[in-house]
Image (cartoon, rainbow, N blue to C red):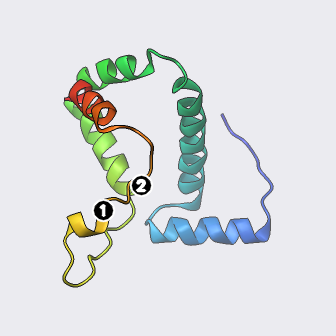
Amino acid sequence: MSLTIELSVETEVAIKELAAQSGRQPEDYAKDLLTEQIEIKRLQTDIDDPQYFSRALAQMKTRTPTETAAVREKMFRLAKPPRHLPENESIIDVVFGKIPGDETDEEVFTALQKLS
């Protein structure tokens, strides 16, 4: 499918800059950006389904090595660059007590058990 979209000058410049930073063509970058937003919308809808996590886990377990490599490449491409730790601090010092959410330890443990 082909679409023609009118963009403001500012948006066009931003897409070109971001595409160049990632070493991609602006058209490919914009296509991936739209695709990712659609995936996010689907996830927001799917997450309300009580069977969603069971289906997602089953799907992950049946990935081929090629599919796994593609997902891994996509995740590394989308990941933000690592941040440097402040001097004299460990990762525990930086993260401990700063994870948002109101889950109990038991809920987190149960979720981790399901994933492993």
Q: Give the label on residue 20, or none.
A: none
Q: Residue at x 33, y 21 (%)?
A: 59
Q: Residue at x 30, y 62 (%)?
A: 95
Q: Position of residue 23 (x, y in %)?
A: 43, 66
The number of callouts visible is 2
Q: Hey, what amino acid is under mark 1? A: Val
- Please state which of residues 35 and 83 is positioned toward the viewer in this rendering: 83
Q: Earlier in the sequence, mark 2 or mark 1?
A: 2
- Please give left or right for residue 92 compared with residue 19 in the image: left
Neighbours of disc 2 within 10 Å: few (<14), some (14-19), many (20+)? few
Q: From the image, which quarter does the N terminus lie in?
A: top right
- Please give left or right for residue 65 compared with residue 32 in the image: left
- Please state which of residues 86 and 67 is positioned toward the viewer in this rendering: 86
Is 48 located above or below residue 15 in the figure? above
Helix, strand or loop for disc 1: helix
Q: Position of residue 19 (x, y in %)?
A: 52, 65
Q: Give the label on residue 95, or none.
A: 1
Q: CB atoms at circles 2 and 1 under 8 Å apart?
A: no
Q: Position of residue 92 (x, y in %)?
A: 22, 64
| Quadrant housing residue 41 | top right
Q: Hey, what amino acid is under mark 2? A: Leu
* Residue highlighted by disc 2: 78
Is 22 located above or below residue 1 in the figure? below
Q: CA distance from mark 2 to mark 1?
A: 21 Å
Q: Residue at x 32, y 72 (%)?
A: 83
Q: Position of residue 30 (x, y in %)?
A: 60, 53
| Quadrant housing residue 85 | bottom left
